[in-house]
Image: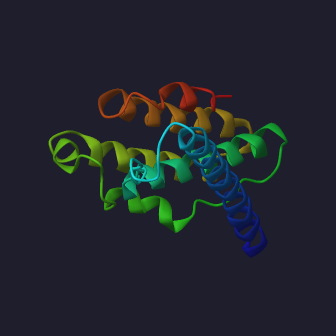
Amino acid sequence: MFTDFFCLMKKIFTISTIFAIAAFVSQCSQSESNTANQTTQDREAPKMYERSELAALMHEVHDLSAIWKEELENGQPLTPVPDWVSNMLTADATSPDELAAGPFEALAHEYIRNLEKLIDAEEGGRVDAFNTSIQTCISCHKIYCNGPIPKIEKLRL
């Protein structure tokens, strides 16, 4: 079990590192192309997008779901649900007032329950349980943040 968790964390770290390098290279490329058109006095510090705590957590949940999808496709045992998933209930959001006014907390609890059902499901019911958890994500994103829906839909089996 510890080795599964270590393997999961290694995969998440690797994916995060790749994204960080890609973002850095992209930013450097943009800076180099802009240098020819600007004098050093005209340059402004680049404004980097900073994810909220909840947005960063959602990206990690997506990566975890991608791992589960791969495990299901390969008939492997599923990685346990990490404790940090429940942090979605308390993480700082980009628009906290918007979340407070709607059903976010209920949907987050439903998602966590669906993950528990996925891990506890018999072999024949794991795909349906996984797809139910993905549908819970989509249902929430239809209310709060539509952007990631196409990416989330690709997780379905």
Vertical order, 36 against 86 (above or below): above
Tell me: 136 left or right of 63: left
Q: Nearer the viewer, residue 145 or 64?
A: 145
Tell me: 110 left or right of 132: left
x 19%, y 41%: residue: 98
Q: Can you say which quadrant of the picture contains the N terminus?
A: bottom right
Vertical order, 145 against 120 (above or below): above
Q: Can you say which quadrant of the picture contains the C terminus?
A: top right
x 44%, y 35%: residue: 136
Task: Give the total number of marks visible in the rendering.
Answer: 0
Tell me: 119 left or right of 14: left
The outermost residue toward the bottom is 2
- Name the spot of residue 127 as percent of width and height, x first: 67, 35
- Name the spot of residue 68 as percent of width and height, x first: 69, 46
- Name the spot of residue 103 as percent of width and height, x first: 24, 40
x 47%, y 55%: residue: 57
